[in-house]
Amino acid sequence: MHFDLLQSISLAGDVSVPNDDRAGFVRGHAWVIDGATDLGPPGLVGSQGGAAWLASIAHGAFTVSPAASVEALFGDVCDAILAGWERDRTRDPEDRWEYPLASSLATRLGEGVLEIGWLGDCVGFLWSGGPVTRLGPVREIRDSEAERAASLAVHGLGSPKRSAPILANLRATRGRPGMRVLSVDPEHMSEVAGASIACAPGDELFLMSDGYAALIDSYGTYDDTTLIEAIRSRGLAAIAEELRAIEQGDAACTRFPRFKTSDDATALWLRIGG
């Protein structure tokens, strides 16, 4: 079996800021990466922001990996990140909050099975001629973030870098031990979550960063099945326009508490070929 591309999209949350998302596929595996927004200016790995740097390193490693399992695939990516960190770092981080981090979900085709691995909160969906199965982490990750944003709303949401109390709160939790994400800290990448599911030619795979999946997990506009039905009917771009319209209609982030008005939003739509 192999993957065929149907559609892809990746939108920056703010066109004045580089997009830290990446997504791609080769014949037998596919991935999405969501770089964690930098909480300080560039400089740690040169002029490029840390999140964009890490996402680019991981994207390149996913592309060239010959791994025969999803675990080995993540192993190749982790090795590339740590090697890149040694090569490109220009100084020591100020603290753990400055570590470049990213979420990622990757899938690999086996014999009649789709292997899934993830670190962080990217999400996937498998459509099998009607039923939709969610792949990756559970929704509680996003619920927790919304609750934290709501608790800090008095300081002004929409841009964490403009609010000293919010920036301090985000820095206090960024890079902490026990996180499971792509990172320059090997401990963060030591336990890749995994699963597998039966699949067949004709099934369709949807991989999303949390910025695109917000239509389900943050805004409640769709559930898993109705989102995939809408994408299959109208396409990724039309649904992305709906996403941005919701966010612009709540630019103050009061109806849907969140730290940024719009996040980078990326989605990849593939079909499994025989």
Image: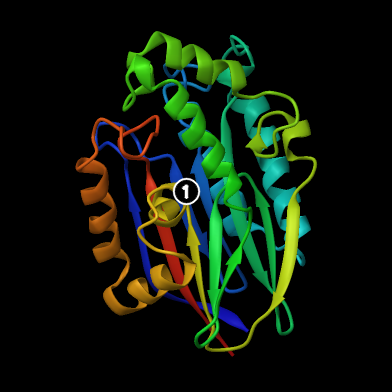
Residue 116 point in image, percent of width and height:
68, 63
**Residue pointed to by mark 1:** 210
Q: Quadrant of the N terminus?
A: bottom right
* Residue 175 vertical position relative to residue 228 in the rendered view, above or below: above
* Residue 8 vertical position relative to residue 173 in the rendered view, above or below: below
Nearer-the-camera pick, 76 or 160? 160
- The reply to whether residue 201 is visible in this rendering is yes
Q: Is residue 185 left or right of residue 252?
A: right
Residue 65 point in image, percent of width and height:
67, 58
Residue 152 point in image, percent of width and height:
43, 20
Q: Is residue 83 left or right of residue 151?
A: right
SS type, badge 1: helix
Nearer-the-camera pick, 17 or 156? 156
Amino acid at the residue labelled 1? Asp
- The reply to whether residue 56 is visible in this rendering is no
Q: Is residue 176 left or right of residue 102?
A: right
Q: Quadrant of the C terminus?
A: bottom right
The residue that appears at 71% across and 84% down in the rendered structure is: 112
- At label 1, counting other C-alpha atoms closer than 10 Å, the crowd grade (few under 14, some 14-19, many 20 or more) is many
The residue that appears at 61% across and 21% down in the rendered structure is: 173
Q: Is residue 81 left or right of residue 261?
A: right
Image quadrant in which you'd find residue 3: bottom right
The residue that appears at 58% across and 66% down in the rendered structure is: 134
